[in-house]
Amino acid sequence: MKHHVIIVLRRRLADDLGVPAWLDFIRDKSVVRETLEPAVDRLMSGLGVKFWITREYDPAGAVWSTDEVLHGLDRTYRMIFQQDFALPKDLVVQIKRVATVEDAHELNIGEAELPAPRLSEAASVGMPRLSESINLAYAHAVTKGHPDVRIAVLDTGVHLLHRELEGRIVARADFVDLEGLPTSGFIGDFKGYDDVPDDEVGHGTHVSGIVAAKGLQMDEGVCPGCSLMAVRVLATMKANGRLVGAGIVDNINAGIKWAVDHGADVINMSLGVKHVGGGLPHENVIRYALSKGVTVVAASGNDGTAERYYPGALRGVIAVGAIDSGGTVTGFTSYGANITVVAPGVQVYSAYTNNTYAFASGTSQAAPFVSGAVGLMKSYAVEQGRRLTNAEIIHILKHTSDKVDRRLRNEHAGYGLINLADAFKLLAHMSN
């Protein structure tokens, strides 16, 4: 296979903007770069390896911004081997030993289990409204969201023609491209960056419905007045008889930066990746997002253990666990990510593929309740002529969520179940 290695230099190349960007290189190989930095070039030449070099990111503007430079996005490059090559086990270690290299790692595949949904044409009669458990009606009496507030859903894509989401999607992109990597287990679309993030398995559509559905044949979304950004970062793979959403971690990073640079106010990531070596997954680009005032919400994971899943386990990210209809934290909620809050996550009814609807459970379903709640709070602030910081949002969640016991914070439930009535009362007080 043709390996890819991500390399972060201590200083960006003097002619860095003359190096083709990775996403451009996928589509057009008429402009190539076959050198990186003299010491790295000598190392690879000694191994008999020819490679191409691309920039991993594009600057948000004409030149690199202070925030992009601060978080190392301007000096992150992708080395693509030109031939199939069996990597020496210590190649990445050798690259990291070069004095001009800050970090290096091979591409990793991140996975998100796709819980089997239960299809339904209509909601079950008598099913308790999950929105009641978080006092959503109180918040909706104040605001149902502002179209200038954008919530980016980074997932398996979105069914773009679903009746519940029609007119909600204002920006879209597909960052799934596994060209040159082993793809025998993948099904459907897994090659070619484009702007058609169609959802093949329903996970991203389900999440998007929880955030912003119109409420035609389901409850309204948490923030139906907000705008959606559909960002496909996960393809579909069959593994051990089950379907998982899978994508290259570094391509997910490109999706995060694209969302930030295209105006996202909130990013929902109902996915999680284990740390398998090197730097923490998504760390630099999440720091960049937070520095731009973007709130990142992520699922804590679904294995019920203290395993840490990223980006939920990164500092500054709102990690979300799930409760059942009785208000109890679910046994499947992973708690290693320093959970911030919990939200409904069992038998949640939402939009699905092909204009259908389905019930599904998981922290993947809990996270968009919180993303929508943050969207509502940011919308209220916009309507009041101000902007909420991430620190203010965390403060509101910390002091208004319903605690599960006498402690301020519980390992399995964080600060508790989000309570939008109390959150908006505190928000109104802060705005006076």
Image (tube, rainbow, N blue to C red):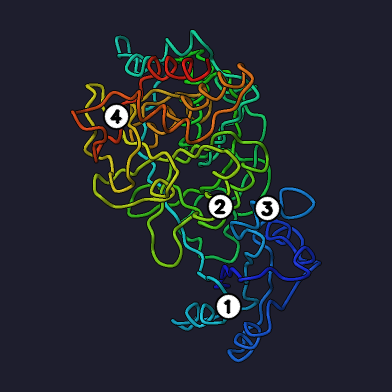
Q: Is residue 43 above or below residue 125?
A: below
Residue bearing the label numbered 2:
285
Residue bearing the label numbered 1:
84
Q: Amino acid at mark 4?
A: Gly
Which of label 3 and label 1 is nearer to you? 3
Residue sitting at 61 percent across and 71 percent down?
A: 10
Task: Report helix, strand or loop for mark 4.
Answer: loop
Q: Is residue 2 left or right of residue 316?
A: right
Q: Is residue 252 left or right of residue 337?
A: right
Residue bearing the label numbered 3:
66
Closer to the chain start, of discs 1 and 4, is: 1
Q: Amino acid at mark 2?
A: Val
Closer to the chain start, of discs 3 and 1, is: 3
Q: Which mark is residue 416?
A: 4
Residue placed most toward the observer, 12 or 133: 12
Distance in Å between CA atoms under marks 3 and 4: 36 Å
